[in-house]
């Protein structure tokens, strides 16, 4: 179920301007989830796996410790 359809179920008709705003928020939340998931995966990688992707321990540590909202 799309976000607009989900919200319209609870609030009735969603004004087109609000759909654009909600769409932007939805993309933002997706980006945050994707970053958090990627950082969790990075945290589970072994030294060998990090070397395979060209990432040092220091680089991985720096990336893992960023807040989810920071690119």
Image (cartoon, grey):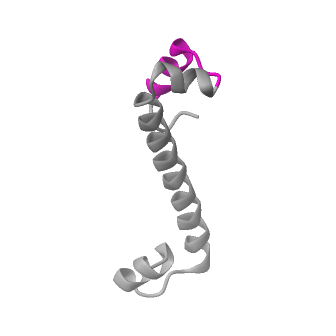
Q: Is residue 37 above or below residue 65?
A: below
| Residue 49 position in % (x across, y down) | 53, 27
Q: Quick one: quadrant of the N terminus?
A: bottom left
Q: Which one is nearer the viewer's eye here, 28 or 14? A: 28
Which stretch appears magenta? Answer: 54-66
Residue under the point 56% across and 17% down: 59
Residue 64 lies in the magenta-colored region: yes
Q: Quadrant of residue 65?
A: top left
Instruction: Choose between 49 and 20: the one closer to the eye.
Output: 49
Up the image or down, 16 lies above or below 52; here it is below
Q: Find residue 12 and report its image quarter.
A: bottom left
Going 45% across and 24% down the picture, which residue do you hit? 46
Q: Position of residue 3 (x, y in %)?
A: 47, 73
What predominant SS class does the magenta segment belong to? helix
Return the residue found at the far left.
10
Identified at 49% across, 46% down, the residue is 32
Q: Please name whichever residue, 21 or 67, is drawn nearer the observer in this view of the structure.
A: 67
């Amino acid at each position: 179920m799309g976000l607009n359809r989900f919200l319209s179920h609870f609030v009735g008709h969603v004004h087109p301007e609000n759909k654009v705003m909600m769409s932007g928020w939805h993309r933002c939340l997706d980006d945050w989830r994707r970053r958090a998931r990627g950082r969790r995966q990075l945290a589970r990688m072994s030294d060998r796996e990090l070397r395979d992707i060209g990432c040092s321990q220091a680089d991985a540590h720096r990336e893992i410790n960023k807040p989810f909202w920071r690119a």
